[in-house]
């Protein structure tokens, strides 16, 4: 076998290398129409994950506190539920107290009311007799008060207005105390700040809020059904607002007058 025939010349070897190089370049050519694959940045991924965790945390906290608030209201309602007509003696006192406002004779009215209240602090409410014609469908909803033998009462009733056919559904909040010696109950119209704070908290309970919402709905429906009733309460509310504004103005004027007064200096007396 002739080995010379198997050897390649230098020219043939160069041609073969060029062909291989050309083929290799063609296989690595990038398609100009193909979209470039985006580069993945680790820092961007970490930032996105952190932001997501923060959002989830905020949502969780909001849900936690809202749920906690609702849970507290439910817990309070469960431990100290609003009870309808549980105490007959309280219902009797509230009914007699409300109807005492309708007595025309001032002296007799005061004598009757004194039987059911611990004081006559609410004397201004006697003005109700000027426009109220009746109290009907009275129901007492009670919760335990802050101390033993005390009660928070929400008295529901339909109030009749003179010269108006439609009655107005209303609810009054009262603080009732039982005398431990006699067992009699009395409405306390003047309460301290601690009692008022307790009553305000009780009013936030879910069952009380449901009651107040129902009464408001009935009241709004009553006004919508009778223009005369609506006009009466619109006028009444305007009068109350004006009275408050007048009181504020008078108080402010009195304070300014006191501040404007010059201080007096004691003058020496001649001996």
Image (cartoon, rainbow, N blue to C red):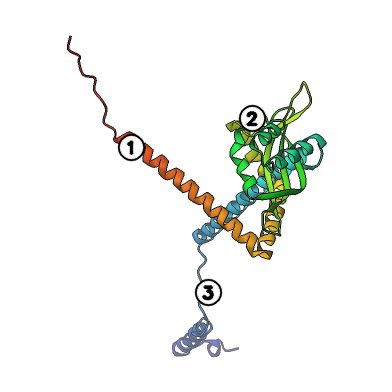
Q: Where is the C terminus found, in terms of image quarters?
A: top left
Q: Nearer the viewer, residue 17 or 67?
A: 67
Find the distance from the CA under tag 2 to the CA under tag 3.
85 Å
Find the distance from the CA under tag 1 to the CA under tag 2.
34 Å
Which residue ends up furthest to the top in the rendered image? 271
Q: Is residue 38 above or below residue 75?
A: below
Query: How many marks are shown on the rendered structure?
Result: 3
Please tell me whether mark 2 sits on a helix, a strand or a loop.
Answer: loop
Q: Which image quarter: residue 147? A: top right
Res 216 visible: yes
Task: Report the residue at 78% width, 39% height from top.
Answer: 91
Per the image, the residue denoted by label 3 is 37
Residue 54's x, y, as percent? 56, 53
Q: Earlier in the sequence, mark 1 or mark 3?
A: 3
Relative horizontal placement of residue 48, taking residue 269 as reference (left or right): right
Q: Would you call the spot at circle 3 few (<14 residues within 10 Å), some (14-19), or many (20 or more)?
A: few
Contact check, label 2 and label 3, Cβ < 8 Å: no
Contact check, label 1 and label 3, Cβ < 8 Å: no
Q: Nearer the viewer, mark 2 or mark 3?
A: 2
Q: Earlier in the sequence, mark 1 or mark 2?
A: 2
Q: Is residue 52 above or below residue 112?
A: below
Q: Nearer the viewer, residue 51 or 248?
A: 248
Residue 93's x, y, as percent? 75, 36
What is the number of the mark on residue 257?
Answer: 1
Which residue ends up furthest to the left in the rendered image? 270
Which residue ends up furthest to the front in the rendered image? 105
Please tell me whether mark 1 sits on a helix, a strand or a loop.
Answer: helix
Find the distance from the CA under tag 1 to the CA under tag 3.
81 Å
Please tell me whether mark 3 sits on a helix, a strand or a loop.
Answer: loop
What is the number of the mark on residue 119?
Answer: 2
Q: Nearer the viewer, residue 271 or 223?
A: 271
């Amino acid at each position: 076998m002739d080995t010379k025939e198997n050897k390649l010349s230098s020219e043939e070897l160069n041609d073969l290398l060029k062909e291989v190089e050309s083929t290799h370049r063609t296989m690595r050519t990038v398609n100009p129409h193909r979209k470039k694959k985006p580069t993945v940045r680790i820092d961007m991924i970490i930032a996105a994950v952190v932001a997501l965790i923060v959002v989830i945390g905020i949502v969780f906290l909001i849900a936690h506190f809202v749920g906690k608030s609702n849970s507290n209201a439910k817990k309070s309602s469960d431990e100290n539920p609003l009870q309808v007509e549980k105490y007959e003696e309280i219902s009797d006192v509230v009914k007699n107290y409300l109807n005492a406002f309708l007595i025309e004779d001032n002296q007799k009215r005061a004598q009757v009311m004194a039987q059911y209240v611990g004081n006559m602090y609410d004397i201004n409410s006697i003005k109700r007799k000027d426009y109220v014609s009746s109290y009907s469908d009275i129901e007492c909803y009670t919760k335990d008060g802050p101390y033993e033998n005390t009660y928070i009462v929400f008295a529901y009733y339909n109030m009749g207005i003179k010269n108006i056919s439609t009655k107005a559904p209303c609810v009054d909040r009262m603080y009732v105390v039982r005398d431990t010696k006699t067992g009699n109950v009395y409405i306390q119209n003047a309460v301290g700040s601690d009692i008022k704070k307790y009553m305000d908290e009780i009013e936030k309970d879910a069952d009380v809020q449901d009651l107040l919402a129902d009464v408001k709905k009935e009241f709004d429906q009553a006004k919508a059904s009778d223009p005369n009733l609506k006009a009466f309460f619109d006028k009444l509310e305007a009068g109350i607002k004006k009275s408050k504004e007048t009181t504020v103005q008078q108080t402010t004027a009195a304070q300014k007058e006191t501040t404007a007064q010059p201080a007096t200096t004691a003058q020496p007396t001649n001996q």
